[in-house]
Image: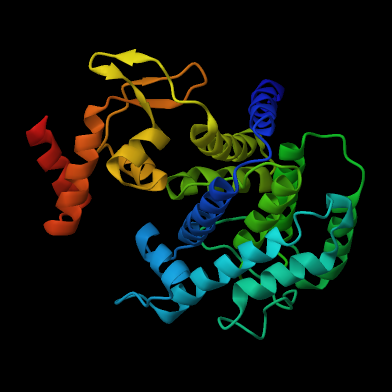
């Protein structure tokens, strides 16, 4: 674990060397993370809004046909809660109070369950499909006081370890009727952001690994897999920032200079998040990686990206249908 944390510390130091970051870049990344964190955190809990639908709800206030009012409200609430924790970033961990956790939770459940928003549970809870037994509701207030005291106490651990433990301990107390995971992930990210780290992105596709690793620890097993999930999420976000900041690579490919993700996005007229998503879905090929481990694309992917956009907007094809069309081109 220490070796991985050392790598993260080095990437964080590299990011710090670029500070102060350009205002336009900061604004762009903040807006992107607001949507991406909202999408991924809610998706982990079963919200069916897609990434694009989440953006429409959060950024445009548009209602998505066929989606429930609760799913819309969950997106709105998480976005507001993210903005709220950003107001606490200038404070230190030692200044956080139990009230901050309650306020995060209150925002998460506003207009969804107002009776329980910002209030500790008074009933027993069980997690569907899990054998983990959560603490009695009677014990929750005292457990949270102990937790809040631990949260602000002196701690020489790496901030990623502290934030990971804060998340794990909170979901293990499970102090609320609903919204425990979303509240814990926001607290995790608040602690990271207070130390200058970008928020950690736990992807929807990592949901099973993430939940299973937490349950393993709660049943007395090792937390190694859990820490790895969080560490990977932190490193993923650091890479996103560094991809946008580092000078364009001069590495050569068969057809010329290879492009970093930001350059490919710019030349194809797409958002970096879109290029990243298409890459994950296998629509765009990665030709190589830089010495820092960042994805590099052949310039031919510019035309591929434009073709994907055309197939999406004009023919309204699904991802699988687009893959088939792209294969024909290749």
Residue 305: give x, y in percent of width and height: 24, 41
Residue at left offset 64%, top offset 37%: 227
Residue 141: give x, y in percent of width and height: 84, 70
Residue at left offset 63%, top offset 44%: 198
Residue 234: give x, y in percent of width and height: 60, 39
Residue at left offset 9%, top offset 34%: 329
Image-quadrant location for residue 286: top left
Q: In the shown orientation, is residue 270 left or right of residue 31?
A: left
Q: Residue furthest left?
A: 328
134 to 15, vertically: above or below:
below
Residue at left offset 34%, top offset 22%: 258
Question: Would residue 251 be visible to someone looking at this image?
Answer: yes
In front of the other: 220 or 119:
119
Image-quadrant location for residue 107: bottom right
157 to 6, vertically: above or below:
below
In front of the other: 49 or 286:
286
Residue 128: give x, y in percent of width and height: 52, 63
């Amino acid at each position: 674990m220490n070796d991985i944390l050392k790598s993260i510390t080095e990437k964080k130091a590299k990011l710090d060397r670029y500070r102060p970051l350009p205002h336009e870049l900061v604004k762009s990344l903040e807006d992107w993370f607001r949507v991406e964190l909202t999408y991924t955190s809610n998706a982990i809990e079963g919200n069916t809004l897609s990434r694009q639908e989440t953006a429409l709800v959060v950024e445009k206030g548009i209602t998505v046909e066929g989606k429930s009012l609760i799913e819309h409200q969950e997106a709105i609430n998480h976005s507001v809660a993210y903005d709220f924790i950003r107001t606490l970033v200038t404070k230190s961990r030692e200044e956080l109070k139990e009230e901050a956790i309650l306020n995060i939770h209150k925002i998460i459940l506003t207009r969804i369950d107002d009776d329980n928003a910002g209030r500790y549970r008074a009933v027993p809870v069980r997690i569907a499909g899990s054998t983990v037994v959560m603490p009695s509701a009677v014990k929750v207030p005292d457990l949270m006081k102990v937790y809040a005291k631990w949260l602000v106490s002196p701690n020489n651990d790496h901030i990623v370890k502290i934030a990971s433990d804060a998340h794990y301990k909170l979901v293990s107390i499970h102090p609320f009727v609903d919204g425990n995971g979303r509240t814990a992930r926001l607290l995790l990210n608040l602690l990271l952001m207070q130390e200058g780290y970008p928020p950690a992105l736990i992807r929807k596709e990592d949901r099973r690994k993430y939940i299973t690793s937490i349950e393993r620890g709660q049943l007395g097993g090792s937390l190694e897999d859990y820490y790895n999930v969080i560490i990977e999420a932190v490193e993923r976000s650091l890479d996103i920032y560094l991809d946008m900041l580092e000078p364009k690579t001069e590495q050569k490919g068969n057809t010329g200079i290879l492009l970093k993700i930001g350059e490919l996005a710019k030349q194809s007229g797409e958002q970096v998040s879109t290029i990243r998503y298409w890459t994950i879905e296998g629509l765009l090929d990665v030709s190589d990686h830089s010495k820092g481990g960042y994805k590099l694309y052949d310039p031919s992917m510019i035309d591929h990206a434009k073709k994907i956009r055309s197939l999406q907007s004009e023919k309204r094809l699904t991802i699988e249908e687009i893959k088939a069309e792209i294969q024909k081109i290749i």
